[in-house]
Structures are given as C-alpha cells and as structure tokens.
Image (tube, rainbow, N blue to C red):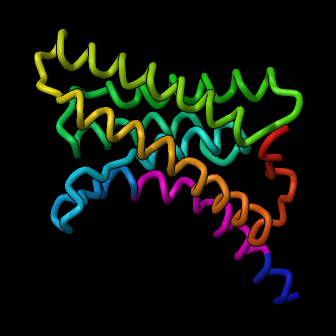
C-alpha cells in the first residue's frame, strides 16, 4: 500500500514540473552577460509553452500561462499583459498545429515554431517600439530568436526524455524527418 502511495505522490510531483519550470523561468530572467557570453540569450518560456501546448496540452493550463506572463511583465518591466498576450498567441499557434498535424515531425514542428516566434517577436517589437515607445535593438532580438529556435531541438529531446522515463508517456515522441 505504501508503494502505491509513493508512486502516486511521485507521479503527481512529476506532473507539476512543467508549470514549476515555467514560473521559475519567468521569475528568474537569466542573464548570460555576467558570465562573459554577451550575445547568448534565448527565451526558455517560449520553448516550454510551445512544446507542452503542442504535445501535452493538459500539462500547462491557459490560466497558469497567463499568470506567468503577468509575472514576466513585472520582472522584466514590460507593460502589464503584453507577455501574457504573446504567450497565449503561442498557445493558439501550437494548438492549431496540433489539430492539423497527422504525423508529428520535429523538423516540421520546429519550422512552425520559428515562424510563430518570428510573428510574436514582430508583434512585440511593434507594440513596444511604436505604441509604448520602448527602445529595442534589432540585433539583440535576432540573436534571441536564433538561439531560441536552435535550442528548441535540444529542449524538445530533453522534454521527450522526461515524458518517456519519468511519466511513462511514450506517445510524446517525434519522428525527425517524416
């Protein structure tokens, strides 16, 4: 009986890891400039939200994503609700891709992810630059998009490994080329 309870508690703990990672990523705001990596920035929350909205829509709820966006706005200093709006656009794009896809493929999903983050960053740039008169730099935004896209491959493989080995969900895997 205690073995069943331990497995149940462990499974519940593993189920809430994506939400915990989301809130840690928006509250932490890692900055690699202090470690000598000046042009290395990526948006982990975009990767996490897109992956779990695409593969396991029940892991991250829309309410948790919206609240995480509000926390991100407070930490970063953006107008309240802007990150939440961008996160929800990312969720809509991932759910759209999930509904139209017959055979999941990491390559196809990553290309759609690239198009989505380009659209989101363009909307964010227009809103911050023209509406709120917030100064952004093209080169920094380009570097952020590039590293976010490239690290999507790595994190999707890590999230697949987590889903397979800790939660026992082996249906989250992609075929790379198909």
Point out residue 92 in the picture as x, y percentages from the top left corner. Answer: 60, 23
Q: Does 128 appear in magenta?
A: no
- 126 versus 135 height, above or below: above
Judged from this view, the residue extending furthest toward the bottom is: 2
Q: Nearer the viewer, residue 66 or 167?
A: 167
Name which quarter of the figure residue 169 lies in.
Answer: bottom right
Residue drawn at 18 percent across, 58 percent down: 33
Q: Is 4 on the left or on the right of 110, as rendered?
A: right
Residue drawn at 61 percent across, 23 percent down: 93
Name which quarter of the figure residue 95 lies in.
Answer: top right
- 44 versus 115 height, above or below: below
- 10 versus 53 height, above or below: below
Q: Where's the N terminus, which quadrant?
A: bottom right
Q: Is 108 on the left or on the right of 133, as rendered?
A: right
Point out residue 44 in the picture as x, y percentages from the top left corner. Answer: 44, 49
Q: Nearer the viewer, residue 140 or 24?
A: 140
Residue drawn at 70 percent across, 38 percent down: 107
Name which quarter of the figure residue 120 lies in.
Answer: top left
Classified by dominant secondary structure, the portion drawn in magenta counts as helix
Point out residue 146 in the picture as x, y percentages from the top left corner. Answer: 42, 39
Residue drawn at 18 percent across, 65 percent down: 36
Q: Nearer the viewer, residue 30 or 178?
A: 178
The residue stretch that appears in magenta = 8-24
Q: Where's the C terminus, which quadrant?
A: top right
Q: Is 87 on the left or on the right of 134, as rendered?
A: right
């Amino acid at each position: 009986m205690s073995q069943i309870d331990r497995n149940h508690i462990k499974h519940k703990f593993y189920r809430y890891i994506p939400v915990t990672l989301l809130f840690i990523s928006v509250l932490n705001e890692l900055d690699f400039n202090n470690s000598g990596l000046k042009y290395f920035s990526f948006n982990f929350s975009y990767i996490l939200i897109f992956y779990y909205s695409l593969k396991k829509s029940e892991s991250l709820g829309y309410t948790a994503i919206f609240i995480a966006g509000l926390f991100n706005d407070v930490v970063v200093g953006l107008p309240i609700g802007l990150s939440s709006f961008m996160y929800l656009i990312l969720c809509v794009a991932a759910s759209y891709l999930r509904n139209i896809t017959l055979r999941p493929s990491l390559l196809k999903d990553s290309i759609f992810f690239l198009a989505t983050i380009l659209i989101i960053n363009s909307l964010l740039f227009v809103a911050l630059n023209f509406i709120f008169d917030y100064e952004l730099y093209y080169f920094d935004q380009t570097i952020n998009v590039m590293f976010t896209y490239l690290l999507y491959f790595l994190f999707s493989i890590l999230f697949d490994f987590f889903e397979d080995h800790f939660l026992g969900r082996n249906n989250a895997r992609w075929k790379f080329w198909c």
